[in-house]
Amino acid sequence: MAVIGLQMAAAMEAERGHQASRQTTSPIAEIRYEKRGLDFVRFAESDNDSLLEGAIGGVLKKGSHAANQFRESLSQQDLYTLLTFCRRSALRALRGQSAKAVETGFCALALIDLERIDWRDATVAANWAGLSSRSGGRPPTFDAV
């Protein structure tokens, strides 16, 4: 017997527990990709990419304690926004638009709490990031994470 949706059900249960104990508001709560930003076939630039790039870069410059606080402030919707950003970063790198996008995409992945998402979604984003790093993007560094 197969149970469909078990991973997402577990993630939603973890998110309910997280929301009950969350102390701070997410700094990226207002950043959401519009429908056009979710279309990876007809890729379109989005201002959200630069907003998230700045937020991720800023928190990682502050070190691992700040990264942990940032992670704790995120909602499940924020986590999925970071996954979208990671996939978009991989595509930007593959399109030759930004070699630095590979590194930023991997850093976004490092900020995701795998307990509060369907872990298979993270593996897809990680595969895209890995592919882009092997296709001419700059290899990731994790000094700040």
Image (tube, grey):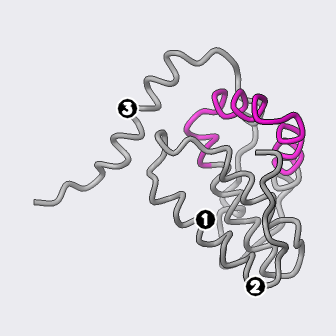
Q: CA distance from mark 1 to mark 2?
A: 14 Å
Q: Residues within 10 Å of mark 3 (few under 14, many from 20)?
A: few
Task: Report if the CB atoms under discs 2 and 3 are less than 8 Å apart.
Answer: no
Say whether residue 20 is magenta.
no
Residue where numbered disc 1 is placed? 126
| Crowd around label 2: few <14 · some 14–19 · many ≥20 (10 Å) | some
Judged from the image, the secondary structure of the residue bearing numbered disc 1 is: helix
Q: Is residue 77 magenta?
A: yes
Most common SS among magenta residues? helix
Pick the residue in front: 141 or 12.
Answer: 141
Per the image, the residue denoted by label 3 is: 13
Query: What residue would you read off at disc 2?
Result: 135
Q: Residue at x 71, y 27 (%)?
A: 69
Quarter residue 134 falls in: bottom right
Residue at the bottom extreme, as displayed? 135
Instruction: Report x, y in % for residue 6.
Output: 28, 48
Q: State left or right for residue 71 relative to residue 67.
A: left
Write down the quadrant of residue 59 in the picture: top right
Percent of width and height locating residue 29: 71, 33
Query: Which mark is first along the chain, 2 or 1?
Result: 1
Q: Is residue 30 above or below residue 137?
A: above
